[in-house]
Image: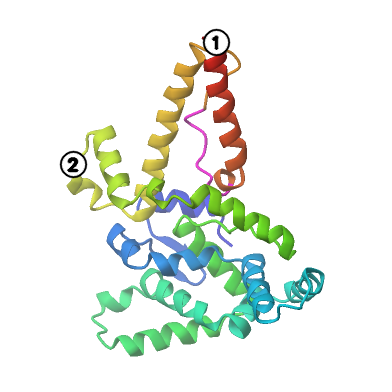
Amino acid sequence: MLDANVIADKVILGLPVNTPYGEFKPFSIEEYMKRVSSISILSYGKKKLLAELGKAYQLANKEVTDEKVHEMLKELYELPLFYLLKEYFNEYLQHYIIILRFTLFYKFDEQNETDEEKNLTEVRDFLFGLTDEEFDEIRKILMTLNNQTEKIAFLNPKIQRGQDKKELYFTGNTDDSPNLSTMITTCVTYSGIDFSVISKWNAFQLQHAFQRIAYLINYETTRLFATVATDVDIENWTKNIDLQYEEKNTDKQFNEFKKQLSGIRNSK
């Protein structure tokens, strides 16, 4: 299995990613835009899928207790992810077929294979011919290739309801989430490069460039805070970009930001 850092290094440089399954290529920015809904499915691991299954089951059987659902989900959790997808979430596998079509089987286009139904059938045969372990490896490659991390979820319905509320709190205002135009114009404005240069980037390169700029701006901001308030931690703008770390530490970052603001107010 290729190390995720090796894959990321190759993608950031626009190099092909050679694996035992063939050569993968990242989505261009345009391709990413077209298939973003399919890409988001990659982040649904076993716990997230089962949490959704538990919610649907309780919705259809209102008399069922959290404890019973929890026990049911714990038993299902012992099954492989690929089996669960085939058995309960078959429609999700269609998204894997679409992603593989344009990241692993992209040479169909170079070979002028215009029968798309035939192309997708070949991709489907490849996918369903994988073992559980091979599917897990393919998924990890695709997640790294597309900058995705596994969603945080819980088998306990009560705890999952709390997680849902937390996600709603932090993502409820979708206007605050940077869209593609924001990411592109930020990179152009901050670096001074031309739009035509960014149009040749892959989606992974754009996401990482935007995140690095965000780190730099955050570093400058915390450095400014430190000149007027005590007990302010200056951000390290050279830290590795780890989306999973960012997701898991949302609460911590929010609390740190509140503490910094409080320090400024108290210093006045």
Q: Which residue is mark 2?
A: 194
Q: Position of residue 219 (x, y in %)?
A: 46, 26
Q: Which residues are magenta?
A: 236-244
Q: Which residue is mark 1?
A: 267
* Residue 24 visible in the displayed image: no
Q: Nearer the viewer, residue 175 or 45?
A: 175
**What residue do we see at 81% from left, 69% from top?**
67
Q: Is residue 61 magenta?
A: no
| Nearer mark to the viewer, of 2 and 1 | 1
Q: Amino acid at mark 1?
A: Ser
Can you say whether 89 is above or below 235 in the image? Answer: below
The answer to which image quadrant residue 74 occupies is bottom right
Quadrant holding the N terminus: bottom right
Q: Position of residue 262 (x, y in %)?
A: 57, 21
* Label 1: element kind: helix
Q: Residues within 10 Å of mark 1 (few under 14, many from 20)?
A: few
Q: Residues within 10 Å of mark 2 (few under 14, many from 20)?
A: few
Q: Nearer the viewer, residue 9 or 56?
A: 56
Q: Nearer the viewer, residue 17 or 97?
A: 97
* Label 2: element kind: loop
Query: Main SS of the magenta segment?
Result: loop
* Residue 248 visible in the displayed image: yes
**What residue do we see at 47% from left, 64% from top?**
40
Q: Is residue 237 magenta?
A: yes
Can you say whether 50 is above or below 147 in the image? Answer: below
Residue farthest toward the front in the current orientation of the protein: 63
195 vs 82, left or right, is left
